[in-house]
């Protein structure tokens, strides 16, 4: 049984917009170590649940999905936004 992680995406630090920060994401933890493929040398494994990332509009919808599918889950709380209020005049003090 895969353990799901439910969280909200943080704002991208490189852009000013907050697109897709209100949706909740469900990710599954990797349960098996990756092993190198003997032919190509690429790391991988047969369990593909760690590649799945699903988005939900609300926390309740994400929890309902995890419960309905029988997955254990833990919710990572959204960090509180810290506003750094400053005036343009502060640059010249």
Image: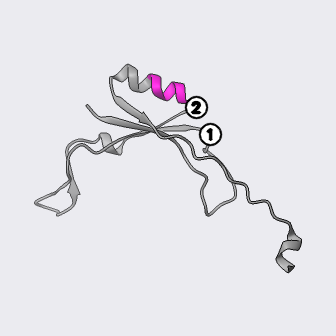
Q: Quadrant of the N terminus?
A: top left
The residue located at (54%, 30%) in the rendering is 59
Query: Could you tell whether 65 is left or right of 58 in the image?
Result: left
Q: Residue furthest front?
A: 93
Q: Quadrant of the C terminus?
A: bottom right
Which comes sooner in the sequence, label 1 or label 2?
1
Q: Which residue position holds label 2?
A: 57
Q: Residue furthest left?
A: 38
Mark 2 residue element: loop
Mark 1 residue element: loop
Q: Which mark is residue 76?
A: none
Q: Which residues are magenta?
A: 57-64
Q: Which mark is residue 22?
A: 1
The residue located at (58%, 31%) in the rendering is 57
Query: Could you tell whether 44 is left or right of 56 in the image?
Result: left
The residue located at (86%, 80%) in the rendering is 92
Write down the quadrant of residue 83 in the picture: bottom right
């Amino acid at each position: 049984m895969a353990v799901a992680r439910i969280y909200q995406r943080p704002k991208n630090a490189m852009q000013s917009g907050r697109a897709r920060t209100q949706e909740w994401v469900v990710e599954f933890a990797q349960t098996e170590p990756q092993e190198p493929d003997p032919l190509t040398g690429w790391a991988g494994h047969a369990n593909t649940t760690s590649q799945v990332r699903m988005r939900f509009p609300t926390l309740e919808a994400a929890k309902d999905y995890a419960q309905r599918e029988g997955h254990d889950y833990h919710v990572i709380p959204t960090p509180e936004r810290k506003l750094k209020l400053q005036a343009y005049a502060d640059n010249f003090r």
